Amino acid sequence: MTPTLALEQLMLDPAYDRFVEHARAVMPVGLRDQHDAAATEAHTILSGAAVRLGDNLSYPTTAGDLPGWLRLGLLDTISQFAAGRATTCRHNPQADRPRPVLAAAWRPGVVVCPPCAPLLSLKHDPAADAVCDSCGHQCTGIEHGDGIYPGMVQLGPLIYQYGTCGDCRPPTASGNPLSGPQTAERDRPRGTGRVRPRGSRGRGRGRGGRV
Ligand SMILES: [Zn+2]
Ligand SMILES: [Zn+2]
C-alpha cells in the first residue's frame, strides 16, 4: 500500500480522532506548538481567501466528506511533502519545520510558501485554467454557463487549491464537527456576482503572506 492510501485509510477510520489525540500527546511539545501555530495561520489565510472569494464559504469538513479525487490529491501532496519528495519554492519549506504552505491540484507534487503562491498560478495558461481538476472537462466559460469553481481545502498547515466544473463541485454541506480538513469554496463560478472577475486560479494569491 502506498503512503497516500495508508494515510487515507487511517483518516477514514472511525478511530482517527483518537489516533490524532494520541499522536499529539506523544509529540514533542515544541513541535506540536509549531504545528498548531502554522495550522492556525493557514486557517487565517483560508478564511481570508473565503471572504475574498465572495461567498464566505469556509466550513469544517472531514476526510470522509471530501470526494475521493480531492482527498487523494491532498493526501498524496502531504505524503510527498512529508517524505521530502515535493518540489518546493526556493524558500525550501519542510514538513518538520511547520509553517503554512500551499499546493494545487493542477500542480501535483509542488509545495510553496504563501509569498510564492504565484508559482502555482495558471494566469499565463487560460486553457489549463479552465480544466476541471476532477474530470478533466475543459470549461467553456461563464458566458456559456460553464464556469470553473475555485476552491481550497486546508489540512494542518497545508492549503490545497483546486478548481472544478459545476458537476464536480464537492458537496458544501457537512454536519460533522471539525476533525480534519477545512474547506473554502466559492458558490458561483469565477467572474460572476459581486466579486470582480480576477482571472486565474491562484493569481495574486500570497502577496504579503496572503493567499
Ligand atoms: Zn517561497
Ligand atoms: Zn468536472
Image (spheres, rainbow, N blue to C red):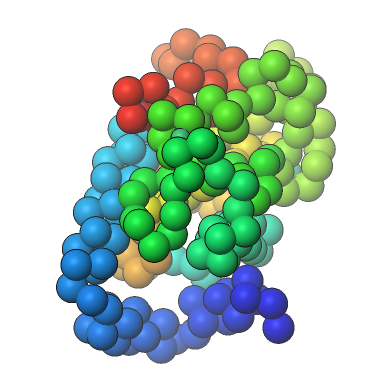
Quadrant of res 8:
bottom right
| Nearer-the-camera pick, 65 or 155 | 155
Residue ID at (72%, 48%): 134
Above or below residue 101? Residue 197 is above
For the view shown, which residue lies furthest in the top direction? 196
Image spot of residue 160 (x, y percent): 52, 47
Q: Is residue 61 above or below residue 6?
A: above
Q: Quadrant of the C terminus?
A: top left
Q: Residue at x 73, y 19 (%)?
A: 126
Residue placed at 65% from the left, 51% from the top? 109
Left or right for 194, reference 140: left
Image spot of residue 127 (x, y percent): 79, 23
Q: Residue 3 occupies which quadrant of the picture?
A: bottom right
Q: Residue at x 60, y 80 (%)?
A: 6
Hey, which quadrant is residue 144 in on the image? top right
Residue nearest the viewer, comparing 186 with 199: 199
Where does residue 93 sit, x and y in percent of width and height?
A: 44, 48
Looking at the rendered image, the quarter that the N terminus falls into is bottom right
Query: Could you tell me how many numbered marks the image carries?
Result: 0
Task: Please name whichever residue, 32 or 60, is drawn nearer the observer in this view of the structure.
Answer: 32
Residue 41 drawn above or below residue 79? above
Q: Position of residue 15 (x, y in %)?
A: 41, 88
| Residue 67 appearing in the image | no
Tell me, yes or no, if residue 160 can be seen here: yes
